[in-house]
Image (tube, coloured by chain):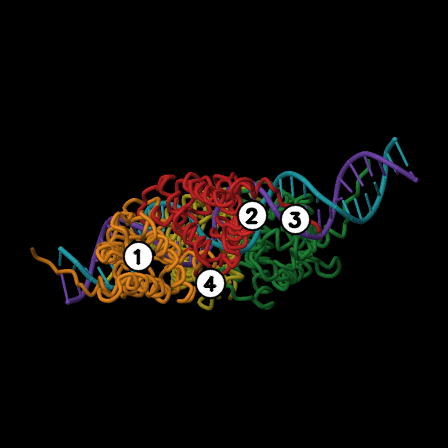
Chain colours: A yellow, B green, C red, D orange, E purple, F cyan
Amino acid sequence: MPGRPRQDTVDEAILSATIELLRSTSFAQLSVEQIAKKAGVGKPAVYRRWPSKSAVVADALARFAPMPQFKPRGDPADSVRRGLVDFALAMLDSGIAHVVYSLLGEALTDSDLAQTLRTRYVTPRQEVVEAALQRCIDAGVLPPDLNRASAQSLLVGPLLHGWIVMGSRPDKAHMTHLVKTAWAAIAARTN
Amino acid sequence: MPGRPRQDTVDEAILSATIELLRSTSFAQLSVEQIAKKAGVGKPAVYRRWPSKSAVVADALARFAPMPQFKPRGDPADSVRRGLVDFALAMLDSGIAHVVYSLLGEALTDSDLAQTLRTRYVTPRQEVVEAALQRCIDAGVLPPDLNRASAQSLLVGPLLHGWIVMGSRPDKAHMTHLVKTAWAAIAARTN
Amino acid sequence: MPGRPRQDTVDEAILSATIELLRSTSFAQLSVEQIAKKAGVGKPAVYRRWPSKSAVVADALARFAPMPQFKPRGDPADSVRRGLVDFALAMLDSGIAHVVYSLLGEALTDSDLAQTLRTRYVTPRQEVVEAALQRCIDAGVLPPDLNRASAQSLLVGPLLHGWIVMGSRPDKAHMTHLVKTAWAAIAARTN
Amino acid sequence: MPGRPRQDTVDEAILSATIELLRSTSFAQLSVEQIAKKAGVGKPAVYRRWPSKSAVVADALARFAPMPQFKPRGDPADSVRRGLVDFALAMLDSGIAHVVYSLLGEALTDSDLAQTLRTRYVTPRQEVVEAALQRCIDAGVLPPDLNRASAQSLLVGPLLHGWIVMGSRPDKAHMTHLVKTAWAAIAARTN
DNA sequence: TTATAAACGAGACGGTACGTCCTGTCTTTTA
DNA sequence: TAAAAGACAGGACGTACCGTCTCGTTTATAA
């Protein structure tokens, strides 16, 4: 197939510029023009790759947002609890957690965006958590009939809830407390 | 002091138009011009009352978004659990829950908005939940040293978490399950 | 009629900027963005008044291009001949004669532009010439059954023909020669 | 020298496509991209051959625009007059006369274009007319000291003047009248 | 009762950004 | 090495909104 192929460096430059800008800008205030300028790229180079600002941002998150990590060795319950707390802290430190909320809000009235966001951002992270939970089940520290979706909501939902609604950054101790409490609940009963 | 006083009907028309539009539009796509047009009002009438689109939307949420309601009689624990589930369902039915996420995301880089949103939207709702939890403490079904912030995060955080990340509307049974599990956790131990 | 009225100063600024730019730019290279910037005006202020670049330029010509002038006293034939030569020289000196050709070319595939250009630019100038010719007929120096359209073509057509095709600026003597020769032809016979 | 040679068919395709498009498009609206697409050719193939849109169009005119033709036999004056009228009619019928005006307008602020246009379009046509006039001088029907430039302006200038400024297509009779009147003037006196 | 002054709907203002199209150049594969 | 194909940086297009500023009108005090 003839024609000049797209340069991967351009993709990279656009996504990097996007993440960089989002550290100091809200999603609504971010503009494609800023992105293109910061990336040293023409606007059409952006639109050739993504159909909208939302899509660029979704991809930038997929590419650069933190991924939960769980140590496969040692106490599996502890691995999950520590991994989730570290993930939440990494989100806070990344400076882009606010974008996730804006974008999830947008996605609820834009099914294309929702599709992208789930495939590229949400699902990969859920799968990592799922695998960690499975190790706990295999080790017998979680019940075999655990409802995975519920468990994820109960463990992850509370972590950034206080931060997003109150704006005060939670400390590690508080997060550890939250995840331990939730863990006790899901470990105690059949889900 | 002379001069024509502001008409309350204009405030009302603007906020109603805003909520109406938000049922079918994302926050980013909503414009003040649309709001003014739909409200049958000039743009200056909007800017005379609020400094920005965000501020209008924050006020519209404060005015029209569901408020948690708890029956003061009967089993206090059941009152809290039922009240929270009903609140979450009301948010889903209102068609504006997505705006809350977008707006909370915006608020993290806009302290004026954050201030408004907390004062007018978040805090009033937290206080209602707080009072309901206090009734449980008074009745002895929750420990007296309960950490209120943690408890709210653990109870509320999971409820819409699955919906926002997966886009599938949770049913009442699932929500009831979530809130019961979380409740068991906070009731069981000292927080 | 409600609403803030348009400012005449904005019209003026846009047309002046247009003429100014056209002295050193071809019609094809001129951009609405340049015009707006030079006029200290937003692009929408231009598009609120005219539907296209062509329309702005047509109006600018109508407003600022030279108008033929004929002395009503003295020898009427001499008045016409001198007036036409002076008009041609004024067009050359104005630095915008080239635009007339580009625009007439555009008008042939754009009937809206053609309409504007004729109403606002061509016809007013033809009428002035027509009146001067009529004075000659009244004075008996031109035949009463003169074909006006032919006469105008024969007198005006040759004047800038050499300039436009060869690019060399004709001098006054040459133009005087052309108009005198053409005059002899139309005065000699019934048209 | 090695390598693939240029295909003459490409030149041909580009110029044909240009002329074809110009029958229904103004010069300003024409784009190189359209030309390339219509010619089934890449843009670089165009830019390899011509430096700009203007240059392509100038060459297309040189290649496809009508050329004045004069019968060498019979009455030489009649030959010139008929030839000029037929030429003007051919220009009208070709559907590209409007381009000539736009392009001449552009040429006045673009000396490269002016150069090309004169060498390839204007001069060849003037030379043909010049030769026809010379035959008239040789035959004694025009004065030997005829100013050729003036004569061409007087004969050719009026022909399309009415059409371009009024937009109404002149008929053959009217053109014949114009050229005869002008002819009488230049034949009558020393130029 | 009459100023005065503010709010009203409307809409123009200087701007910014949109998403598209085109420019003229550069880079790839194919022939 | 020229071909087509098409990506590249850049710039202009014409539109939608931004938040501000007149307009002419309406409406309620305060003089």
Q: CA distance from mark 4 to mark 2?
A: 77 Å
- As helix, strand or loop, the secondary structure at mark 3 comes to helix
Amino acid type for the residue under numbered disc 4 = Ser
Q: CA distance from mark 1 to mark 4?
A: 25 Å
Q: Quadrant of residue D96?
A: bottom left
> Relative to B83, does residue C35 appear above or below in the rendering?
above
Q: Is residue D52 left or right of residue C140?
A: left
- Nearer the viewer's eye, disc 1 or disc 3? 1
What residue did someone put label 4 on? Answer: D168
Residue at 7% from the left image edge and 55% from the top image edge: D1
> Relative to C166, does residue B71 appear above or below in the rendering?
below
Subunit under mark 1: D
Mark 1 closeness class: few <14, some 14–19, many ≥20 residues within 10 Å: many
Indicate which disc residue D57 carries. 1
Indicate which disc residue B63 carries. none
Q: CA distance from mark 3 to mark 2?
A: 36 Å
Subunit under mark 2: A
Discs 3, 4 touching: Cβ within 8 Å: no
Q: Could you tell me which quadrant the N terminus of chain A lies in?
A: bottom left
